[in-house]
Image: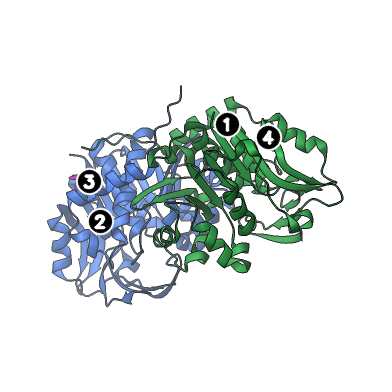
Chain colours: A blue, B green
């Protein structure tokens, strides 16, 4: 059973979409990554921080998915990171209404001792300094380090971001962020420039238009499953990353061909995430449902042109 | 050898892109469709109209691709349809600078007698009344009628457009046009509404994001090949339609599984079209180049997850 370290926020989210709004609900990158990776029966540990206001039932939810939560620090006198956002009608853009860092402001991540030899490390969206600190705690070089980040860190911590980008194997970012990071409009050219920054593999997430995987001259394109409606996109990117990381940790195979499968699993899991608010759809997602949707993905993308 | 009737403009285009501009060059929907369909060795006939100003060498170009041009009327005292446009920096949007209908204004299409029993009819972008007139000239119901149209006809001839949409089997339109035609943002819902208007098959072209094929509950998604740069998108949609129609005419197989292949051929051919101005890249495209890019498409999209 492969070991997987997951770093990221464990948080409260309050979400408004054209379909409704929520009070404070469970959110955070590490939460979505963990719920997604839990479909691969890997030995996962989450590294994060919450405040004394964080409900035990949310922690139990992660534990019950066999995620080691000993690396989630609980600061009794502190408050949990809180994000609130409102999606526009097209669901492709959103306004951040509230960001309260709270306990995240002074977070010093500690990787549990028994996970310091993990084969796969998934650095979810967080300050690059925190991501670097986690990497430095690993006893041996992991087989694969995956980084997810966002434009916020390009705006306010670009030098630190470049330091961590230099040390990782796979980066997952969205199309606009890839353009911002490189100054290139063509995603093919942007991916090449990101390769030169360090990562051998570049995954560019295009939301409803799917995801691209680049490795030098190899390219793979997984479309997103066309959906009747996207109910809430929150956490879809993290769920994608969690599926990708979980599949690699389970199979232990970091070949390009196997990463294609990892992208398909990530896309499949993300297609569920957007169907309900927050983590709701992911909490009780069954293996049967995942299997059925993988079949849909094959129908969606596979064709039979024989070529010599 | 399957027979294919192609209807559409044969025109002069003048194009401006961020990479440069052209004088009047060969353009038109029927031209791009014909050049693309010529890769399938079908018995194709083009139905269109040009003026006395149209160079013989352009007509020869089509003849040399084994396209029957006896259905291209030459109005000696008239001028050829002329379109001029300027693409914006993102290459996804454009301004029309000039539209001179000229001989197109009074065009009465005549399908050559020996093609009135064609198995496949490709109704390229033109006034819906002209498209309907072509259908009425067919001696027997074709095996497959494919319609391409655009927002212009939704704005100014919607009732006529609905008349022709009711009589066809496959419609190819882009994503924004599908949304305009149905008032639905979700392409899945839009496709369902278009089914209800008549066509059993709906192809939604998403430019750099690929193309979707819908048939009731069946969906297929062909991504576009990621390109370093799109030099000139003019004719890409027509080239896609020509590849789709040519492949169906060649194989005579209108099953959903075979239409997937038709979409892949259409996408492959369109990926060449955008590499140079106008028809330049398509004029001398070799079978070897097409074969090589089809292999790239397989690499791009095919994966190996075994599912029971």
The stretch drawn in magenta includes residue B255 = no
Give the residue number, with chain letter if any, for mark 3: A291
| x then y, percent, for residue B124 | 61, 49
**Gap in angstroms between the C-alphas marked 2 and 3:** 29 Å
In the rendered structure, the residue with mark 4 lies on which chain? Answer: B
- Mark 4 or 3, which is nearer the eye? 4
**Gap in angstroms between the C-alphas marked 1 and 2:** 62 Å
| Residues under numbered marks 4 and 2 in contact, where contact means CB atoms less than 8 Å apart | no
| Residues under numbered marks 2 and 3 in contact, where contact means CB atoms less than 8 Å apart | no
Which span of residues is magenta-colored? A40-44
**Gap in angstroms between the C-alphas marked 3 and 1:** 42 Å
**Gap in angstroms between the C-alphas marked 1 and 4:** 11 Å
- Which badge, 1 or 4, comes first in the chain's sequence? 1
**Gap in angstroms between the C-alphas marked 4 and 2:** 69 Å
| Residues under numbered marks 1 and 2 in contact, where contact means CB atoms less than 8 Å apart | no
Disc 3 packing (10 Å; few <14; some 14–19; many ≥20)? some
Give the residue number, with chain letter if any, for mark 2: A47
At horizontal 23% and vertical 56% (from top left) the residue drawn is A35
**Labelled disc at residue B42:** 1
Give the residue number, with chain letter if any, for mark 4: B68
- Mark 2 or 3, which is nearer the eye? 3
């Amino acid at each position: 059973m492969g070991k997987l370290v997951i770093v990221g926020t464990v948080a409260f989210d309050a979400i408004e979409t054209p379909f409704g709004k929520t009070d404070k609900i469970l959110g955070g990158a590490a939460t979505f990554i963990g719920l997604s990776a839990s479909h691969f029966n890997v030995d996962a540990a989450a590294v994060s921080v919450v405040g004394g206001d964080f409900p035990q039932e949310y922690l139990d939810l992660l534990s019950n998915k066999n995620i080691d939560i000993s690396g989630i620090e609980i600061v009794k006198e502190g408050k949990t990171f809180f994000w609130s956002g409102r999606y526009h009608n097209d669901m492709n853009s959103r306004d951040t209404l509230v960001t309260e860092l709270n306990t995240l402001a002074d977070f010093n991540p500690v990787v549990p001792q028994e996970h310091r030899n993990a084969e796969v490390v998934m650095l979810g969206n967080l300050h690059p300094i925190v991501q670097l600190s986690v990497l430095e705690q690993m006893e041996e070089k992991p087989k694969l380090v995956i980084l997810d980040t966002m434009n916020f860190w390009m705006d306010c911590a670009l030098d630190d971001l470049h330091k961590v980008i230099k040390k990782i194997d796979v980066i997952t970012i969205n199309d606009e962020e890839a353009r911002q990071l490189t100054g290139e409009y063509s995603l093919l050219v942007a991916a090449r420039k990101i390769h030169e920054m360090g990562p051998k593999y570049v995954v560019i997430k295009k939301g409803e238009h799917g995801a691209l995987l680049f490795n030098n001259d190899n390219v793979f394109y997984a479309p997103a499953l066309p959906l009747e409606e996207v109910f809430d996109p929150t956490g879809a990117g993290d769920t994608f990353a969690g599926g990708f990381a979980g599949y690699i940790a389970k199979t232990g195979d970091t070949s390009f061909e196997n990463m294609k499968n990892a992208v398909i699993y990530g896309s499949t899991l993300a297609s569920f995430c957007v169907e309900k608010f927050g983590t709701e759809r992911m909490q009780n997602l069954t293996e049967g449902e995942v299997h059925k949707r993988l079949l849909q993905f094959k129908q969606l993308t596979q064709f039979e042109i024989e070529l010599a």
